[in-house]
Image: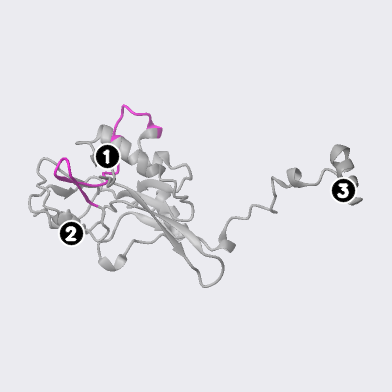
């Protein structure tokens, strides 16, 4: 079994804005692409073009329709991956020590050479964040793109997780949640960021920003319909051939 560190020097993680996420799955595609091409063994697919396709993904987006007490129903898109918990049960249950939490940044990783694919970590994870790669026979999970964020060969702008770099809506944020003055920590404080399933006692590092009420949305000024000029009538009475045809038909 693997022991968790008593403390970590940093708590790198994600802050996901459920009010901004549009469910485009760009984060899913970029995660799949980056990790398949750059990290460890590729994330395999089984019968991707067959009748029953399946595959290994480290990040998924679920969509839920929510009916508030008042007003119209809302469609909430919910991205989910490993939350890099402080009390990660996937680590302590691992029989070979393949799963571990790094002291320097708090990232939870899997040493694939030591993993036997027993699936105990997936059973212990309350968030369903681990998947067994059917082709490789080992467990896979989000690494926070550890091979990107420390890669000095990349431009500094790209030294963030692929999902964060790709998100077109700016719904994903990355940083040190152990630093109260970091941008992500200030964002969590300002928006009331929450843990996913706090009753599990895992103390996830990743936080979610809940959807805002409609009256809490930023004031963008008076509404403006961009199509209004195109929909305005061009004439009160038909003219030309259509006008002649209209007058002729009125006689019958």
Q: In this rendering, would 230 be left or right of 26?
A: right
User: Between 240 and 212, which is closer to the camera in this rendering?
Assistant: 240
Tell me where residue 208 appears, x and y as whole percent. 39, 57
127 shown above or below 225: below
Res 123 label: 2
Corner quadrant of residue 148: top left
Residue at 31%, 35% in the rendered image = 34
Q: Residue furthest bottom?
A: 69
User: Between 9 and 57, which is closer to the camera in this rendering?
Assistant: 57
Closer to the eye: label 1 or 2: 2
* Dot 1 or dot 2, earlier in sequence: 2
Tell me where residue 134 appears, x and y as whole percent. 18, 44
Closer to the eye: label 2 or 3: 3
Instruction: State if disc 3 and disc 2 touch (CB < 8 Å).
Output: no
Res 209 label: none
* Dot 2 or dot 3, earlier in sequence: 2
Separation of residues labelled 1 and 2 (CA atoms): 24 Å
The magenta stretch spans which residues? Answer: 130-157
Q: In this rendering, would 115 be left or right of 69?
A: left
Disc 2 secondary structure class? helix
Disc 1 secondary structure class? helix
Residue 74 visible in image = yes
Res 146 label: 1
Numbered-mark total: 3
Q: Based on the picture, tell me whether residue 233 belongs to the magenta stretch.
A: no
Res 249 label: 3
How crowded pointer 2 is (Cα within 10 Å; few <14, some 14-19, many 20+) is rated as some
Tell me where residue 176 appears, x and y as whole percent. 34, 48
Q: Residue furthest top?
A: 153
């Amino acid at each position: 079994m693997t022991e968790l560190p008593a403390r970590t020097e940093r708590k790198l993680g994600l802050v996901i804005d459920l009010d901004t996420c549009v469910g485009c799955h760009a984060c899913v595609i970029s995660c799949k692409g980056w990790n398949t091409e750059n990290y460890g063994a590729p994330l395999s697919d089984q019968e991707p073009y067959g009748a029953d396709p399946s595959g290994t993904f480290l990040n998924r987006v679920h969509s839920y329709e929510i009916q508030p007490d008042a007003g119209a129903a809302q469609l909430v898109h919910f991205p989910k991956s490993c939350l890099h918990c402080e009390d990660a049960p996937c680590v302590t249950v691992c029989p070979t020590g393949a799963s571990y939490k790094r002291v320097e940044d708090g990232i939870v990783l899997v040493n694939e050479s030591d993993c036997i694919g027993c699936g105990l970590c997936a059973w212990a994870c309350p968030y369903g964040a681990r998947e067994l790669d059917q082709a490789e026979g080992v467990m896979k999970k989000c690494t926070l793109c550890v091979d990107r964020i420390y890669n000095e060969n990349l431009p500094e702008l790209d030294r963030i997780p692929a999902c964060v770099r790709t998100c077109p809506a700016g719904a994903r944020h990355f940083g040190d949640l152990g630093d109260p003055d970091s941008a992500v920590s200030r964002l969590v404080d300002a928006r009331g960021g929450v843990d996913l399933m706090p009753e599990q006692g895992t103390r996830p590092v990743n936080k979610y920003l809940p959807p805002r009420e409609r009256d809490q949305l930023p004031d963008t000024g008076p509404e403006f319909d961009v199509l209004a000029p195109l929909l305005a009538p061009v004439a009160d009475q038909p003219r030309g051939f259509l006008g002649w045809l209209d007058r002729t038909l009125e006689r019958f």
